[in-house]
Structure formats: C-alpha cells, structure tokens
Amino acid sequence: MHRHIGIVGAGMIGLSTAWFLQERGFDVTVLERAHPGAGASWGNAGWLTPELTTPLPHPSVLAYGVRALLRPTSPVYVPPTADPRLVRFLTSFARHSTHRRWARAMRDYVPMNSMALDAFDDLTDGGVDSPTVDADPFLVCFRTVRERYAMLAELDEIRAAGQEVKADALDGDEVRQVEGTVSDEVGAALRIHGQRYLNPPAFVKALADAVQERGGAVVPEADVRRVLDLDDRVALHTTDGRERTFDAVVVANGAWMNRLVRPFGVRRLVQAGRGYSFSVTGDRLPAGPVYFPTQRVACTPITSPAGERRLRVAGMMEFRSPEAPLDHRRVDSIVEAVRPLFSGVDLDNRVDEWVGSRPCTPDGLPLIGRTRSPRVFAAGGHGMWGIAWGPLTGRLLTEQIATGQASPTLRPFDPLR
C-alpha cells in the first residue's frame, strides 16, 4: 500500500487528488512550480456545466482552426509554425475532429459528467470553504435565430450520446427579460437548466487550505524537472537541486506533464491550448453565466477578494507554447467580439488580464490513471474541463491508488492508450 504520495501540480486536479487521498488515510505532499492555482485553474471561467462539457475535437472547431490560419483574431488561433511537435498534435487533432469520433468520445464523457457535481459536493460537505453557485440563469446567446441552429444541432448530438440536456429557447425580448445586460444585438438564446459555477481562484485556495489544515504539505516554488522510479520508491527532482522520495507520485502539472510521464510509457501528446481572461465592472453585471458560442466567449460573475462584484470574461483557444507571453491582441479580440452584445458592462476597465495553458490532448480525452510504473500516475490533459472534472478525477484516481483497480469509467482515459 502506498502511504506517502507526492503530487506534482497544485491546480484543481492535483489538490483534489490530494484531498481525496487524505480521505483514504494517505499522507500527501503537493509540489507546485509557482503557487497553488497559478496555472490553468486561475483564470478559468469556472463553469460546472455537465450538459455542455464535451470533447474539444469536433468538425466545427476544426473549421475554426482552418480559418484561423488566415485570420489571427479567430477564437481558435493556430500561429504559423515549423514546430514538428505542434504539427504532429494538430494533424492528430484533425483526424479526431469527425462526427463519428466525437460521438464516441462524447459517450465516454457521459459517465464523468453524471458524477462531476457530486464530487464537488464531497469537497464542500467535507470542509472546503468555498461555494459552488447554482447558475440561474445560464444563458447561451446568439445574434440571430439562424446562429442558434448550430448549437441546437450540437445539443442533439450530446443527447444522442446519452447526456441529458434541459434547455429552453428564448427570443431576444425574452432573454432581455431574464438578463437585462444583454443588448438589442442578441436576437435568440437558450436557457440551460441545472448547471453551476464557482470562482476558480477562491475555490482552489480554499482547497489548498483544506489540504494543509488536514496535515498535508503544499510546497510552492518547487518546479519538478524529473521523476525517477527507484523500484520501491519514486524520486522527484526539482530545479533547486532537491530530491524528495515518495511511495507513489501523481503527475498533475497540466501542459508541462509530457516531459515527466513520457519515460513511463505515456505517448499521448499534451499541447497547451492557451485561454485568455480578464475581469470588468459596470453599471450592471449579469446575474449568472452568459455564453456567446459564435464568438466562443464565456462570461461569469465573480466576487473579488475585496468583495467587489465583477464579471470574468474568457475566451480563445491559442495553440502555442505554454511559456509564450500574453498577447494583448487576443484580449482586444475578445473585447471587440462581445462589446456589441452587452449593455452596461464596462469592457474598457479591465483588471487581471491573464493567459493560461489548458492541457489539451488530440483525441479530447484526458489522461487519468497508472502509467507503465505501478508507482507513477497521470492526471491531466483535461483541456477546458480541468475545473469541472478536477474533483471527480481526484476521487476516481484515489480509488485506483488505494485499491489497485481502476474504475471502468476511467478506461477510455488510460494514459497508456
């Protein structure tokens, strides 16, 4: 039985895994290259939306990507590159962007989606002091009824895979009765029921606090560069020259995980799909999340640490190095895409402009489970859904570590596939 577990990465997935391991009596140490929640978790839109959690490779996303080669302001941006690794990822991504493969992946998503919210309840009922909020309303908005057709077709695909979706169609006047900050430019909408959201930095901080209060260690500024299997132990080497040994290790460091898990048989690429976000104020802010699918922009009401109500605006899928600097043109593109669609939101008074690297796989399926080593486990590659699936990933992976048996739900996400 592994008793002391080292976890690489203090985002939602790594910290959730630590918390559930503690529930089973394990000692945990979490090593983080920056500080808890500093990676893709920090600027996430914070949606807990099982009915909209779907695999990224889809014909519509591929079409966006092709147009992006000619239009850098596209919501999906692929910069011209000679990087063979990125070319290999994009080629595989394109192969998986068919209706048949998307439908198969979506069927794999359905069991995870059905349990995702319960895993959050496990955390909050167990003392993690940060709420999840009912998304009432959760609005998906379009300029025209015709624009809405594509989303309705996608919802039909989601239902066909076995995922329940409860949605009402609204016209422009009806959506403004529900949410007065939506401008007259919005002519159609969908109201999705049964979803939730959270404030990602606040929730991840509360999760880190809970892990530490129960005796776990969360070590910032500990950048793990190498994982060594020592036959009966696992060593983690950090850039400061230290070596720490554990009974087992979970690698949950997002877009940086390839270099650590590849020596253990994990060949599936994990590519940074960089997302941008910022927060704004205004005379009026939406009461709940608002999504503009055509512009691929997600908006979520949050409360700052000082108690100020703000709106987080997030968008873009930029396939670049996770180390590349923030490109202000992407922020400008998001602003100009949604400016006509809001009334009373001050998009020019921005704070917390951010770029983070979502860890994407070419088949849209994360990597969750044991590697070739019985002491090294992977937990990453969730794309846009690291927040939504983070607690459930931690719960299911803990079960595998504790019992030696993986849940059938995890079979499609085998890191060795």
Image (cartoon, rainbow, N blue to C red):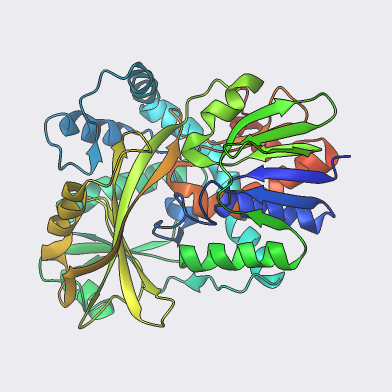
* The image quarter in which residue 167 lies: bottom left
202 and 227: which is toward the camera: 227
In the image, residue 280 sits, relative to residue 229, either above or below, namely: below
In the foreground, 260 or 99:
260
Q: Where is residue 156 in the image (x, y as percent from the top left)?
A: 38, 46
Residue 194 visible to the viewer: no
Res. 225 image quadrant? top right
Give the left or right position of residue 259, taking residue 323 as reference: right
Q: In which quarter of the image is the N terminus?
A: top right
Q: Which residue lies furthest to the front in this view?
A: 241
Is 278 located above or below residue 67 in the figure? below
Please say if 176 is above or below 295: below
Q: Which residue is drawn at 15% across and 54% down?
A: 332
Residue displayed at 23% across by 72% down: 175
Can residue 398 be seen in this snapshot? yes
Residue 394, position in %: x, y? Answer: 66, 49
Q: Quadrant of residue 150?
A: top left
Q: In front here: 233 or 237?
A: 237
* Percent of width and height locating residue 349: 19, 71
Q: How many marks?
A: 0
Please tell me which residue is depicted at 29% across the width and 36% down the height of the picture. 61
Residue at position x 41%, y 81% in the image: 306
State left or right for residue 286 relative to residue 22: left
Q: Quadrant of the C terminus?
A: top right
